[in-house]
Image (tube, rainbow, N blue to C red):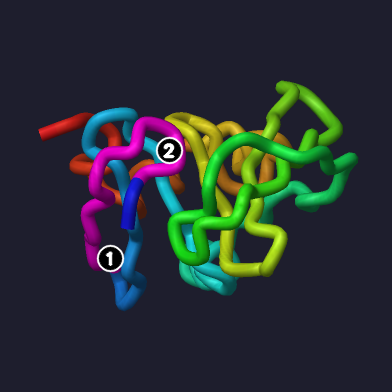
């Protein structure tokens, strides 16, 4: 699969039974449908609801190559996530998953980064 942000080949890292597709260059992360929920269950972290206005995006879904929607999440800090319109998953640019977890105060950004592992925070 290719990174929707920089087009580099995504690498697969397995962590606690989950296959995480990540970009070693821009440090983005692709989560297939259901993987965000699995991270939630493993860490006991609840993420802010992923609801908000959608508009056509510019990035291709790594799974189906259709143009993803850009979802503007309400709240602080403002976040804009890419979501496959076919429901294949979510693209998180570097730092967005941690920022999402810190929004509600239920778990911390450090919990998420620790779970994903050091290798997902910086390029090899």
| Of 124 and 82, the residue lying toward us | 82
In the displayed structure, would residue 114 be above or below residue 34?
above
Q: Residue 101 is drawn in which quadrant?
A: top right
Q: Element at badge 2?
A: helix
Q: Residue at x 59, y 56 (%)?
A: 66
Q: Is residue 104 or residue 72 the one in the foreground?
A: 72
Q: Tell me the residue that label 1 is attached to.
A: 15
Q: Is residue 115 above or below residue 27?
A: below
**Camera-side mark, 2 or 1:** 1
**Location of residue 87 by image quarter:** bottom right
Q: Write the start and end of the magenta stretch as one range.
A: 3-15
Task: Return the residue found at the far top.
Answer: 77
Residue at the extreme right of the image, as rendered: 53
Residue 89 in the image: state x and y as whole percent. 57, 62
Crowdedness of circle 2 by 10 Å Cα count: few (<14), some, many (20+)? few
Q: Gap between marks 2 and 1, in whole Å?
A: 16 Å
């Amino acid at each position: 699969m290719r990174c929707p942000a920089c087009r580099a080949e995504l690498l697969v890292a397995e962590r606690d039974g989950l296959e995480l597709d990540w970009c070693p260059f821009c440090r983005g992360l692709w989560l297939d449908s259901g993987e965000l929920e699995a991270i939630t269950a493993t860490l006991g972290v609840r993420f802010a609801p992923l609801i908000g206005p959608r508009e056509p995006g510019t990035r291709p879904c790594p799974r189906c190559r259709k143009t993803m929607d850009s979802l503007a999440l309400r709240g602080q800090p403002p976040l804009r996530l890419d979501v496959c319109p076919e429901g294949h998953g979510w693209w998180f640019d570097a730092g967005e998953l941690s920022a999402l977890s810190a929004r509600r105060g239920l778990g911390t950004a450090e919990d998420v980064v620790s779970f994903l592992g050091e290798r997902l925070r910086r390029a090899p």
